[in-house]
Amino acid sequence: MTDIEQMIRQHQHKLRACTACPDMIPPVVVGSAVVSPVISIGQAPGDREGPAGKPFAWTAGKTLFKWFESIGVDEELYRSHVYMAAVCRCFPGKNPKGGDRVPSAMEINHCRNWLDMEFTLLQPQLLIPIGKLAIAQLITVKKLVDVVGEIHTVTLQEREVDIIALPHPSGLSTWHRTEPGKTLLNQALQLIKNHPAWLQTFAARLK
């Protein structure tokens, strides 16, 4: 085990013990402790992810992994090679008006400390934010059509990092199933497929 692998495991051990947000519903959900130049960032786990013990473990995950299968990477390969982070790592609970509660600014800030540490440890070359809440933590977004389907380069911790945004694969959303979202999603996936960090991560599989 490399030093970075050990540090990631220690980081996740501390993360799993976090109780900073009293309105969040445990457990803390984290992905595999993989060292990767690619980090994907979800929004927050749903009520199914906690019992499953992994992010994107239910309906939205099935759609998400179909997207990645379309560019040659199945779910098992993705989970074992991409570091899966999120804006918040605990289930926020249900919104009385329907759907899941949107995390508060305080909750997002608490979890941002964990995300920043992951950026420090892994020094990613490619970030894949999934959903508007995740995208907004990295770049300004008013409408998905303005950010999906392009590469955005930002300075993060004094390093340039590429961002390729994806819509949220929620079954409640029609954005990725209607135009122009359908075309923009495909453009984003092709950009991911051809990005040097993705090619490096999956070099053996994609030859």
Image (cartoon, helix red, strand yellow):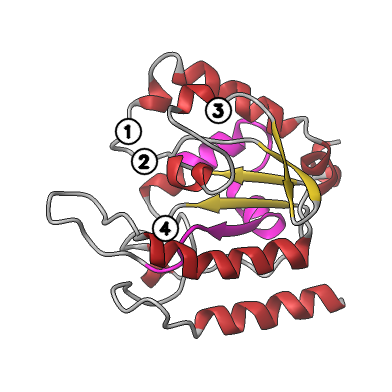
- Mark 4 is on which residue type? Ala
Are the residues flagged by discs 3 and 1 in contact, CB closer than 8 Å?
Answer: no
Which quadrant of the structure image shows residue 74? top right
Mark 2 and mark 4: span between their CA atoms?
12 Å
Judging by the rendered image, the residue that carries numbered circle 1 is 173
201 with respect to 147 (left or right) = right
- Mark 1 is on which residue type? Ser
SS class of the residue under badge 4?
loop
Which callout, 3 or 2, points at the residue further toward the start of the chain?
A: 3
Q: Residue 170 carries which label?
A: 2
Between residue 196 and residue 136, name the one nearer to us: 136
Judging by the rendered image, the residue that carries numbered circle 4 is 44
Mark 4 and mark 3: span between their CA atoms?
20 Å
Q: Tell me the mark number nearer the camera, choosing from 2 and 4.
A: 4
Q: Does the magenta stretch include residue 167?
A: no
Judging by the rendered image, the residue that carries numbered circle 3 is 147
Say if 162 sits above or below 35 in the image.
above
- Mark 2 is on which residue type? Ser
Say if 109 sits above or below 182 in the image.
below
Mark 3 and mark 2: span between their CA atoms?
18 Å
Residue 36: give x, y in percent of width and height.
Answer: 76, 57
Residue 1: give x, y in percent of width and height.
Answer: 84, 79
- Mark 3 is on which residue type? Val
Residue 127: give x, y in percent of width and height.
Answer: 67, 46
SS class of the residue under badge 3?
loop
Are the residues flagged by discs 4 and 3 in contact, CB closer than 8 Å?
Answer: no
